[in-house]
Amino acid sequence: MIRSTVAVRSIVLGIGLLGLALAIPLNRGQAGPDATSAERKPAVLRGDSDVVTRVGNDSCLARGCHGAVGPSDPTTGHFYFKGGEASTWRTFDPHARAYEVLLNSRSVKIGERLKVEMKGQKPHRAKLCLDCHSPGLDVKLEEERDHAAVAVGAGVDCEACHGNASRWLAPHVSATWPQSTDKTSSDLKASYGFKPILALEERAKLCVSCHVGDPTKQVNHDLIAAGHPRLLFELDSSLSALPRHWQEPHEKPNATVGPTDFHAKAWAVGQVVTTEALLDLLKMRSQAASQGTAPWPEFAEYDCFACHHNLATPSWRQAVPSGRTPGSLPWGSWNLSSVKALGQISSNAKVTDKPFPLDVLMAEMSQPTPDTSKVSRLADTASVWVKSLRDSGKLASMDVKRVESLILALRNPAAKPENWDEAVARMLGLVSLSKAQVDLGGQPIGQDLSREIESLKRSLQFPSGFDSPKVFQP
């Protein structure tokens, strides 16, 4: 068995977004709001500067703010308690240790193998790594310090998700800081540099900027070959797997809504936003390749196990795949089959017209050497299709009928998964949609679907000591 460098166990654990409104207390040196003075309330929401800078999350961890210590039960997933959001994040959330990862032996070896890409810097000082592992760390300020003494702010900290806090630090603890989640309140908060990430789409966009990549940062095949885990992301499973230091709207003590379609909505929004990010990244890579500044095709976008697998005969891999010739690589297999299921149930003719633009793009990307200019054009067309799916696919709400239709689309025996990537993505989708079906008042999943999901899970697991499936046949 070829031991792949792909650490896909992270898919089951998931790494999602850090959550809702961690906060920073009122600066002691600044005049605080007078909650009893109606005349002074408007003045509270006034920034001291037009420049939005980082403050650091030390004050978030103060016990009187978000650093309280209370009962948390990791075995049951009960992490959230009011006032302890930052301490829960710091203690349990893997994002809090994203910087520390750059100091371990695996990262050091990656740095040694990629000296040119790292520009002579070690991982804990290289922009290539820090853009995602510690986006707020100022290397110049820290270069005189020993790495063991780096501030708590290193890592994916409060401000990395909630925005640089210099202008919203004081207002956010005032009585006049908006508590509602409507667009007006969100826009006002955003004007102070605060990121209102309660909406699933905003959370997903923030997550995929690192967990998929964007034109400014990416994990390519060179980085994976050097030892970096492959980037695979799914929103709902990530939100479910994280040690929660926030509450969803339906989980709040005085909630007026139930969970209803939350899991289905999170899955659907995650699929669409992830696909949009993937297409943006593909376009950038194709354009860079046409200019001779990037390798092509970029193997990080393909199924790893199409190459990293046992060589055996006879083998199911020798069968002619649908739409591809033997030996060609399946592109986008992790995410695209699931997002196409959303297209199949759409009521918008622009979305349901065949062939799907994603299918056309996949056919070109399955060529031995895809045409870069053609790929760039097809990526634009596919992006328009996905945008139509997002805008007209009623992702903002899901009823039982839509959820059941999606389950049928993912279980369609005529379009069974061709590889490990596609099988895992479908399994995660079935889990999320099955939860939503129950929450919406539908019938619990039947024994056949339950057995199907459990069977999928077993076939997708990696044996102990392996970072790839030892035996998998779709």
Image: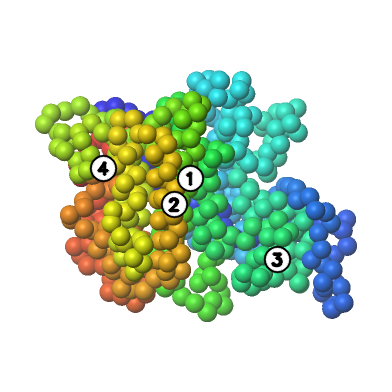
With respect to residue 388, does 415 lie above or below?
A: above
Neighbourhood count class around disc 4 (C-alpha, 10 Å): few under 14, some 14–19, many 20 upward:
some
Residue marked by disc 2? 383
Q: What residue is at 68 percent from the left and 38 percent from the top?
A: 137
- For mark 1, give the secondary structure: helix
**Contact, CB < 8 Å: mark 1 with mark 2?**
yes
Q: Which badge, 3 or 1, is on the more N-terminal residue?
A: 3
Residue at mark 4 to residue at mark 3: CA–CA distance:
46 Å
- Residue type for callout 3: Leu
Which disc number belongs to residue 419?
Answer: 4
Q: Position of residue 75 (x, y in %)?
A: 44, 55
Give the number of the mark in front: 3 or 1. Answer: 1
- Residue type for callout 4: Asn
- Residue type for callout 2: Ser
Give the number of the mark in front: 3 or 2. Answer: 2
Give the number of the mark in front: 1 or 4. Answer: 1
Q: Which badge, 3 or 2, is on the more N-terminal residue?
A: 3
Q: Quadrant of the N terminus?
A: top left
Q: Position of residue 450 (x, y in %)?
A: 24, 61
Q: Which badge, 4 or 3, is on the more N-terminal residue?
A: 3
Question: In which image quadrant can residue 331 be found?
Answer: top left
Whether residue 169 is visible here, answered yes or no, is: yes
- Residue type for callout 1: Asp
Residue marked by disc 3? 188
* Nearer to the camera, 104 or 379: 379
Residue marked by disc 1? 280
